[in-house]
Image (cartoon, helix red, strand yellow):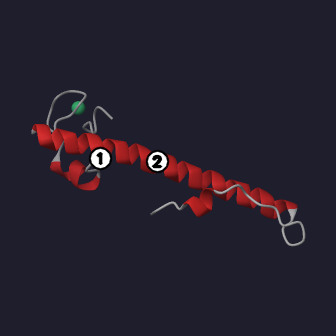
Amino acid sequence: MIVTDEALRPVELDQTAVGRLSRIDSLQNQGLTKNLREREQVKLALLGDAIRKMENGDYGTCDGCGGQIPFERLFVFPEAPVCAACS
Ligand SMILES: [Zn+2]
């Protein structure tokens, strides 16, 4: 899911059409959108690290214990820097 800039704009209040509850709703939706974007940025950073590890030839190696991250885990979370036990 892509988070657009549109969704992150300040919440505008249309006094004629938007009631108090709608405004709270809008603010809550914006909070969710911000959380999504933060999660995307974390994932993007982890993917960058994963690409560097591929270039170094140690992709799939756990940053925590140095063991091999199971293929099944990498298949679901290609950006995972650690194995399930170390996460
Ligand atoms: Zn580990």
Give amino acid for label 2: Arg
Q: Residues within 10 Å of mark 2 (few under 14, many from 20)?
A: few
Q: Which residue lies at the image location 21% right of the left edge and 45% below the top edge?
A: 51
Q: Which residue lies at the image location 73% right of the left edge and 58% below the top edge?
A: 11
Indicate whether 83 appears above or below 33: above
Residue 25 appears at what percent x and percent y? 74, 60
Secondary element under disc 1, as helix, strand or loop, is helix
Residue 27 appears at what percent x and percent y? 72, 55
Residue 7 appears at what percent x and percent y? 61, 61
Res 87 → quadrant: top left
Q: Residues within 10 Å of mark 1 (few under 14, many from 20)?
A: some
Q: Which residue is mark 2?
A: 39
Q: Is residue 31 left or right of residue 74?
A: right
User: Which residue is situated farthest in the left direction here?
Assistant: 57
Marked residue nearer the N-terminal end (1 or 2): 2
Q: Is residue 22 left or right of residue 5?
A: right
Asked if the beta carbon under badge 1 is closer than 8 A to the nearest atom of ligand 1, the reply is: no
Residue 47 got which mark?
1
Indicate whether 53 appears above or below 65: below
Indicate whether 65 appears above or below 43: above
Q: Which residue lies at the image location 23% right of the left edge and 30% below the top edge?
A: 63
